[in-house]
Amino acid sequence: MIDREPVIRVGIMERISRVQGLFKKPYAGPNGAPELGEFVAEAVARGVRVLRPDGTLIAEGPDLTMTASEGASFVLRNVTIGINFHWERKEDQEFAGSLRFIAHRDSSLTVINHIGVEAYLASVIASEMSATSPAALLRAHAITSRSWLVAMLEREQHEQAPGAVRGSVTPDEVVRWYDREDHADFDVCADDHCQRYQGVTKILSPEAMTAVRETRGQFLVHGGEVCDARFYKACGGMTEEFPNAWEDRDVPYLHSVSDARAQHSPVRTEADAERWIFSSPDAFCNTNDGNVLRQVLPSFDQETTDFFRWKVTYSPSQLADLIRSRSGYDLGPILDLVPLHRGPSGRITRLKIVGEKRTITVGKELEIRKWLSKSHLYSSAFIVKRETGVGGRPSAFTLHGAGWGHGVGLCQIGAAVMATKGYSPEQIVLHYFRGAKVERLY
């Protein structure tokens, strides 16, 4: 395990040909000369070229690093956030630390921020949580985020990255899962695919800074290793097992647990799933307390209000068009959606889609969510109600669902409610990561 703070590479932008920015304090290029003010970076035949607004060349090459002076920060214009989510948008964002540009053969650029783990975490906590969040929640999330990040870094040192998409594809079945190993040029991206990171765009609240400082070097540990501590918005009352979202291996501290003081029975059958999803069980994340939601959800996440139980309705042709656009498979009008396997939280991990032209089975949970929504379905914990029309053919499919996200590990909204009820940071993280311990490693 680690014994000192790492410096990480955060991918801010990818597959762009040009970016505008601003050095707010001096940055040194490869020649050591200080640069200050507006700049443009663009892909050219020899790699990447960084220019001042008047066209004066600052630096050129296939891989350029602009090194920060003490306390320096830079601004990037039109950074895309919320990629592929319903609230995707562009913002100008500001970052501390060094700035790196990598050029690629397809004449595109990758923009990377080099930053220490603790400074990175202060931004993550401020981005994921409101400054008005209870201190226990901010500290619990700092421990969780730090653990996930360093576990990923340590895994990289011992494994060769297997690529962005893993699983299997046959003519009748598509099983895929996704992890952060699709990032070849950096350690972690700045968007929700990894952890939401906005640098110092927002004023880092004293509360977020205190949470990171007071938990500095603290990690969830199990079996002599830093825990791969996953998190998401809301479990829907029960958390999910690791292999139902990712690879088929047991992770002892990522087993399913009830998001409540009392133990709920796991979903084992379709009848269980229907009872569970049409119920309103006692759960920490079963809340409509506006104060709590404002604490844990940034403004754009507050656009989602029906996360604990939700529904969406499609016609057979709408569903066919959606699946064709999202998956590339033309199944024709959809005749049926048949869950083949669920996890204990009710999340479907294999779904049979019956179309007029062909039938195909899809998994795991995120791939199902991708196929059934223009962005991402809130979760794969849903039951299907099929309405029939003329001749007994389906006229509509309504998905009644539970939760928001993959459901593995820490439930952010549940953790927020636990914090308001007086649970300590350690009690919160150990509720979701059973069998782990909190240890300070540096």
Image: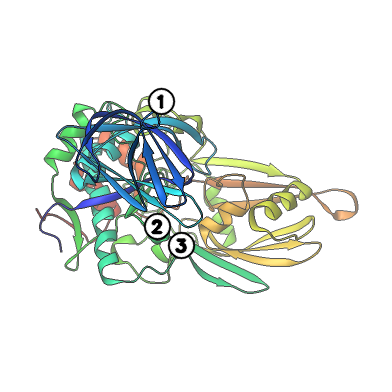
Extreme residue toward the bottom, this view: 170
Tell me if 167 is positioned left or right of 181 in this view. Answer: right
Disc number placed over residue 290 in the picture, else none: 1
Tell me if 286 is positioned left or right of 227 in this view. Answer: right
Q: Where is residue 19 drawn, in percent x and y? A: 43, 37
Callout 1 crowding tier (Cα within 10 Å): few <14, some 14–19, many ≥20 = few
Where disc 1 sits, the SS reads: helix
Q: Which is more toward the observer, 81 or 319?
A: 81
Q: Amino acid at mark 2?
A: His
Up/down of 92 relative to 322, above or below: above
Q: Which residue is mark 3?
A: 164
Q: Tell me how far mark 1 sits from mark 2, CA to CA.
A: 36 Å
Residue ID at (44%, 59%):
266
Q: Tell me how far mark 2 sits from mark 3, CA to CA.
A: 8 Å
Q: Which is more toward the observer, 411 or 67?
A: 67
The mark nearer the N terminus, 2 or 3, is 3
Q: Amino acid at mark 3?
A: Ala
Where disc 3 sits, the SS reads: loop
Callout 3 crowding tier (Cα within 10 Å): few <14, some 14–19, many ≥20 = some
Residue contact at pointers 1 and 2, CB within 8 angstroms: no
